[in-house]
Image: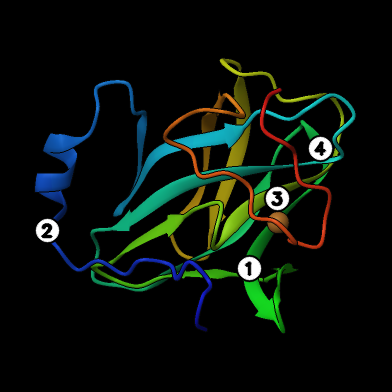
Amino acid sequence: MQNLGTPLFTFAVAAALLAAAPAVARDYTLKSLKIVDPYARATPPGARTGGAYLTIENHGRDNDQLVRAASPVADSTELHTMRMEGEVMRMRAVTAIGIPAGAKMALTPGGYHVMFVGLRKPLVAGEQVPLALTFQKAGTIDVEATVAPLDGGAAPAHMPGMGMPAPQPAR
Ligand SMILES: [Cu+2]
């Protein structure tokens, strides 16, 4: 589990975080879950894959799990994690991402993420990507992920050696 960009399990009260969130962040509420600031990364022409990221806060008393993601932008939409295999960081599909009661799970470029496989068109910065998220207990919610620029300062660069074609920074 080391060097994975370990998902953050933060048991802090979320109110302070919410108060500090930028006004542009888009949040969604589904029962006891809050989905914070879903975004995707812009993709270069011809890219077959893309990623989407978000934070899920579980304000309820029951554990939940993200069990499915779906989007019309790709042939399939998968839940992935990253793991080290020897010296190489590789992605692996997972069947569910746990969202423990009272916890916050961040899906990030270095950890758990939503993966678009077989992109039907490039993801363009500024556009919105429809994303349906299904949780084991809370059900399904439709959100829109804002596409962030490839070279956006806040977003971490793609890691080298991920086992798939990684977009290069804008030339
Ligand atoms: Cu992936």
Q: CA distance from mark 1 to mark 3?
A: 11 Å
Q: Quadrant of residue 120?
A: top right
Q: Which residue is mark 2?
A: 13
Q: Is residue 129 left or right of residue 29?
A: right
What number is the disc on residue 115? 3
Q: Could you give the CA–CA distance between mark 3 and mark 4, rounded to whole angstroms? A: 9 Å
Separation of disc 2 and disc 1 at Cα? 27 Å
Amino acid type of the residue tagged 4 in the rendering:
Ala
Ligand 1 contact, mark 1 (Cβ < 8 Å): yes
Of the image marks 3 and 4, the number of the one nearer the N terminus: 4
Q: 150 or 123, which is in the foreground?
A: 150
What's the residue type where badge 2 is placed? Answer: Val
Q: Could you tell me which residue is drawn at 23 percent across and 67 percent down?
A: 102
Q: Position of residue 129 (x, y in %)?
A: 63, 27
Amino acid type at image mark 3: Met
Label 1 or label 3, whichever lies nearer to me, is 1
**Circle 2 — which element?**
loop
Q: Is residue 49 above or below residue 123?
A: below
Instruction: State how many labels appear.
Output: 4
Mark 1 Cα within 10 Å, few/some/many (few <14, many 20+)?
many
